[in-house]
Amino acid sequence: MNSLLENRLLNDFQHDFPLLAAPFETIARELGVAESEVLQTLTRLQQQGVVSRVGAVFRPRSIGTSTLAALAVPEERLEDVAAMVSSYPEVNHNYQREHHYNLWFVVAAPDEMALQRVLKEIEDRSGCRVLFLPLVEDYHIDLGFDMTGNRRKNASFIAAHAGSPCQPYLPSQDESRVIAAIQSGLPLVERPYEAVAASQGLSEATVIGCLQNLIGKGVIKRMGVVVRHHELGYHANAMVVWDIPDEEVSSLGHCLGKLEFVTLCYRRPRRLPAWRYNLFCMIHGRDRKEVLARVEEMRQGCGLKHIACEVLFSTRRFKQCGARYARAAA
């Protein structure tokens, strides 16, 4: 096992994956190894669960629709309800968190009608009221993990990972076929775009052109290796929620999004009286102490010392996979 190769693949190729006919050959040349070694290593890391997939991460609500949602489930029913929620292909993340609302999940669907159908079914089957929290504005969404401690959020990086399109993008027919084919990841073969093209009755050039356009439009936030944080040693993660005055939420959201350790930062609606918070951040750390220290850094760095917040630590991961925004072509 080449640990140096693993570390380079996991750290250096989370962004800017080559849009070339033989992308793994390009990566292998940069790393000074054989293409077969790159493919074998990524395949093994994916089988081990360290790599979720290699491919596209889509900007939320740029195509289809999605939402964060939560349930307050009686403890004795939590495993059964979590299994039911995870059984929906539209659910891509499903976590237990330390809170009265103890089950948090993300639903992605091709359209709002499909999204609401899933939420209604989950509400009916669980017997618990769904807390529905769609994205209002994002200030930083990346979920890349720096394994070196040397990466910095420069101005261009921050700009690339903040802000949502004003209107959802309507993909072309070819783009829709490509999205459906890659949303669970690229095939780990020498010519992945050719393999995608063959499965959809398209040309390799068309697939690459579609991906280039989707990246240019901001629909795809990044192309690369998508890792799982827990398997990389980030054993503590928390969703930090803040009750920010509405007139200040955008400025404070941008402030928090610039912090090195914040992987997600976005505004969601309040749901009074059940839910008072409107600004959400994700922090990942090696342990709880590190996460709590970073919450204090957030308070100090952005002037939040007197702002009400809660820290919802994740205690169990029931499901984590790529979002499915498009229906597979018939």
Image (cartoon, rainbow, N blue to C red):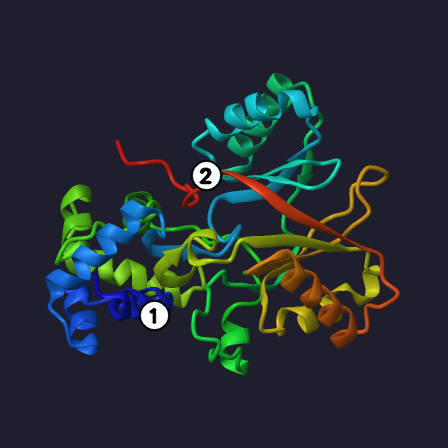
Residue 34, by quadrant, is bottom left
Q: Residue tagged by mark 2?
A: 110
Q: Mark 1 points at which residue?
A: 16
Q: Residue at x 51, y 58 (%)?
A: 234
Is 46 located above or below residue 11 in the figure?
Answer: above
Q: Which amino acid does label 2 sit on?
A: Pro
Q: In which quarter of the image is residue 266?
A: bottom right
Which residue corresponds to the image point at 22% horizontal and 65% vertical from the top-left?
2
Q: What residue type is labelled 1?
A: Asp
Report helix, strand or loop for mark 1.
loop
Based on the displayed image, in which of its 4 quarters is residue 56 positioned? bottom left
Residue 246 visible in rendering: yes
Give whichever of 243, 170 is nearer the camera. 243
Q: Which mark is residue 204?
A: none
In this rendered view, identify the residue nearer to me: 210 or 142. Answer: 142
Residue at (16, 77) in percent of width and height: 32
Q: Where is residue 264 in the image (x, y as percent from the top left)?
A: 58, 60
Q: Is mark 2 on a helix, strand or loop?
A: loop
Query: Reading the chain from its start, which is encountered first: label 2 or label 1?
Result: 1
- Residue 170, position as x, y percentages in the image: 43, 50
- Residue furthest out toward the right: 306
